[in-house]
Amino acid sequence: MTEQVIEKKPQTNSKKILRFVIDNSVTLLFVVICIFGIIASKEQPFILVSMLLERMTRNTFLVLALLIPVVAGMGLNFSITIGAMAAQIAIITVAYLKIPSVGGLAVAFVISTPIALILGKYIGKLLNRTRGQEMIASMITGFFADGIYQMIFLFMCGTIIPMAGGFILSSGMGLRNTIDLMKDNGIGKSLDNIVSVPFFYVTIVAGLVVVAYYIWKMKKESPEGFKKNKMIAYIGIGALLTVFSILVMFTKVLPHKYALLKTVNMSVFTALVVGGFAVFNVILLNTKLGQTLKTVGQDKHIAEVSGIKVNKIRELAIMLSTVFAAWGQIIFIQNLGILNTYGSHKQIALFAVAALLIGGASVSKATIGQAFLGVLLFHTLFIVSPKAGLNLFGDAQLGEYFRTFVAYGVIGVSLGLHAWKTLIMKRNE
């Protein structure tokens, strides 16, 4: 008998586009919702851009802290809340000792790191005992840790822990609800104020870099079909960004509401810290440790047979995630300039996870690009929802309800899809 070789026909561009739409349906839906929200809110462009830029620089680090546990097959780490608590312990210490500005910020990073490492190790051990249920276990762990945190700062400070002065409530027990980090040359805005430049100077450079990179890449690879069209689209976006930025910064041809965009400043140093962390993630995942994390995430049994200490690697993934969450919370709080002692950490896991999922990630796969895109879309929705609700229905509170619904809804849908896919895979084994 002669064997017949069946060659797979290459997919047409229309099928590739359809596949792309299906695979990124959640992200594309949120792009549409955000565009509709921006139109409905009638928000001034310079306000929207400045608020979004500030949220991008202060929130992205926390979202990136979720990536390593996903790569290691542990799902979405809701226990980053505990890393945030470690950061707040450090911030309270620095504020109480009145260590000023950048020096205080550096001390906060130093204090939070060992606390987060120790807590992360114990969280990792717990999650190793709840294999297959890591996400719900990490969520419950966060709630449990919050109870301990509240007990320490509500009942132990001023009594068992010797603290006095303006930080303590008039009863002599418990910390105040809010701590002003801008007062007495505190750490508020200390990272953001190191270097600040007009945002559209940065976009001119970014646009030119994108155009130059993809032109070079097209010449080097000579791509065809869908890939070529994709590169041309990136070149077009980069060119449009550059032209628009030049018009904003150096001409007066744009309407007044767009001309005001030149007043938008960017905290360059904070952005570089976030960008550096993203690069660190890329480098880490291409090292031997990164390959080990991927192996554990893909198949724990094969990893164990290969001699990998799976439990140790999983512990390490959670320890790193907890430390990075602590650092991200310090960046977040210093940007706000005020610490809500009992509430600043409460929803960071929910919002970080929701942002990552909106960017196109899943329980089992997440990338840096999805983290950045998710933060952009999620916080655009956060900014425009109240005004859109007010303009459409006469009630800004409806916008607040909608964005809360979105945060919980996207997590619920993602977990449901993951459970469905897992069930299908088990049936096909």
Image (cartoon, rainbow, N blue to C red):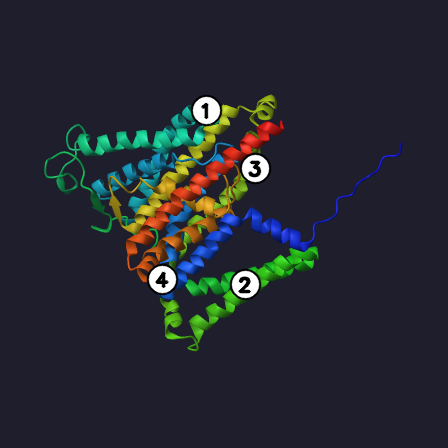
Q: Dot 2 lies on which element? A: helix
Residue at image position (82%, 39%) is 5
Assess disc 1: are there few (<14), some (14-19) or many (≥20) residues with their C-alpha within 10 Å of its C-alpha: some
x and y percentages locating residue 303 in the rendered image: 58, 26
> Mark 2 Cα within 10 Å, few/some/many (few <14, many 20+)?
many
Q: Earlier in the sequence, mark 4 or mark 2?
A: 4
Q: Label 4, label 3: how many angstroms apart (C-alpha)?
A: 46 Å
Which disc is residue 287 wearing?
3
Please name the amino acid that badge 2 sits on: Gly
When the figure is inspected, residue 232 is found, relative to residue 361, above or below; the finding is below
- Please tell me which residue lies in front, 111 or 32: 32
Location of residue 154 in the rendering, given as x and y in whole percent from the top left corner: 19, 34
Residue 77: x and y in percent read 43, 35
Relative image position of residue 73 (x, y in whole percent): 51, 32
**Disc 4 crowd, CA 10 A, few/some/many (<14, 14-19, 20+):** some
Query: Which mark is first along the chain, 1 or 4?
Result: 4
Point out the tag, 3 or 2, that comes first from the N-terminus.
2
**Residue, disc 1:** 128
Q: How many marks?
A: 4
Residue 238 is marked as: 2
Which residue occupies 51% across, 53% down? Answer: 28
Residue farthest left in this picture? 171
Give, as a three-letter code, the residue at label 1: Asn
Give the side of residue 226 with respect to residue 372, left or right.
right
Residue pointed to by mark 4 = 41
Sequence-earlier tag: 1 or 3: 1
Query: Residue 200 sits in which quadrant?
Result: bottom left
Q: Quadrant of residue 325?
A: top left
Would you say 21 lies left or right of 7 here? left
How far apart, in angstroms, are the residues tagged by discs 1 and 3?
A: 24 Å
Mark 4 lies on a secondary structure that is helix
Give the Cα separation between the discs numbered 1 and 2.
45 Å
